[in-house]
Image (tube, rainbow, N blue to C red):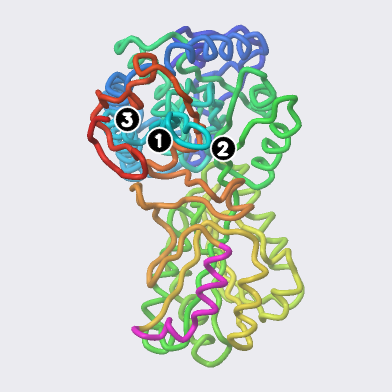
Amino acid sequence: MTGKNYIGNKLSARGSKTFRTFNPQTNSENDTVFTEATTDEIDEAVSLASEAFKTYCNISGEIKANFLNAIADNIMDLGDTLIKTYCSESGLPEGRAKGERGRTVGQLQMFANLVKEGSWVEASIDTGIPEREPAPKPDLRKMHIPLGPVVVFGASNFPLAYSTAGGDTAAALAAGCPVLVKSHPMHAGTGELVASAIVKAAQKTGMPNGVFSNLNSSGIEVGEQLVKHSGVKAVGFTGSIRGGRALYDLASQREEPIPVFAEMGSINPVIILPEALQSRNESLAKTYASSITLGTGQFCTNPGLILGIKGEILSAFIQNLSNEIVKIEPSCMLHPNIIGAYENNKQKAITQQNISVVADYESDVQTNYARQTVTTVEGETFLNNSTLHQEVFGPYSLVVQCEDTNQLEQIITKLEGQLTGTLIAEDGEAKNYSQIVSALQNRVGRLIYNGVPTGVEVCPSMTHGGPYPASTDSRFTAVGIQSIKRWVRPFSYQDWPNELLPDALKNENPLGISRLVNNIQTREEI
């Protein structure tokens, strides 16, 4: 580990501003000194990416697949060095580190398979009819093409799966876009190790210099410069509403506005229907105590809001949840800044009028360990106080006691956009709450039935996004193969000579991909 930036394939540290990462378990700084990227280094990295794009956008799916698979192999080859660095910079346990590494490698391999097969470009062909009256019909052929250099912001809570070689980077590279990573300062060492794996893979598979760069930053300046740079064509971000919205606004104010695909805050409402509460009260309390505290509550899908109909059954659930959650041993948060924000936001929530703290871990905890908390409030109070709607990032959840089904629907309707919504119901119960389900569908990107929101399966059918502020564009997912669509745009060729068309659109279909030809899906030649 050098503490330097990767400007394309070259290590560079021209700046004077330095920083270290922090080990929250030992409550001390790590050894390596990292150098923040300078304006000149940023300019050089973007220039290299722009030049690389000219070649990389036309590289075959098979060669891109080799590149992505080589990255996956190289990450695994980092072995225990990567795992130990991950743990020292995050406070997360070894099992979590290895699990996240597996997910990261799996995502890269998934996109490799996608681009090697090739049908993801969604080729569409409408052959011409020169003899058509009163006007000839032109020959039109459409496919997805890459946008250009993409900036990816590393996420604080996922040092691997949502960071340097995470889902955004894997999808952008698969699409044909060079990537510039703004490394997260909390895990810059993990980022540098993974960046070395990407650069090594790029060199081994003959990728153009500049297809990937990794830039260190201790604050917001490097990220701001990257988003405003004219050579950057899109941005991927996972983090807070405040951070994502700031980047979105910067990108919108450019002379040439660019898309920002930001996955931001979410409290992931959970609706527990009466029959389910009656029959599974204790087991649901235990399940949700575990979900609220999983990973110290540091997941974007943490169940921060639980809704039910007021009454003795809901009161019993609240008591059971309180009893179960304080049995769980607290765990370490990612950084002193993270736990500081958790305590501040929690304090802001619990000091609101008419809110009751029903569970609060009271025993002594180690430094940077978070105390889990459950609160409750009446439905009317929740409706009239938007502060209670805001995310408290950590092991915290609010139970809202609704007067009736109408108030429950009203609350769901007035929620901001969310990543997930969960319905807990007995067999046949949900059909009596169709309006609740409909209201929930309009506010979330994914509906869960009789489960927990924590855990995001990486597969083609996953939607990880939702109405603002869950994400800046609810039409796209940040997880799964469909996330590649964020980094491409549709492009049509009209009356273009067959020999000059890209292989995906040629009459003979040399790639053997599935195409929509005159409104029929086929792999046949024309």
Horizontal and vertical percent position of residue 466: 55, 54
Residue under label 1, please give it.
Answer: 126
Q: Nearer the viewer, mark 2 or mark 1?
A: 1
In this view, the residue in front, 68 or 520, is 520
In this view, the residue in front, 436 or 43, is 436
Residue 430 visible, this orientation = yes
First in residue order: circle 2 vs circle 1 = 1
Going by the image, does 35 lie left or right of 59?
Answer: right
Residue under label 3, please give it.
Answer: 115
First in residue order: circle 3 vs circle 1 = 3
Dominant SS type (magenta): helix
Going by the image, does 494 lie left or right of 265?
Answer: left
Residue under label 2, please give it.
Answer: 237
Q: Quadrant of residue 175?
A: top left
Residues shaded magenta? 427-443
Q: Which residue type does callout 3 highlight?
A: Val
Q: Quadrant of residue 57?
A: top left
Horizontal and vertical percent position of residue 380: 71, 81
Residue at x 58% of width, y 85% of height: 405
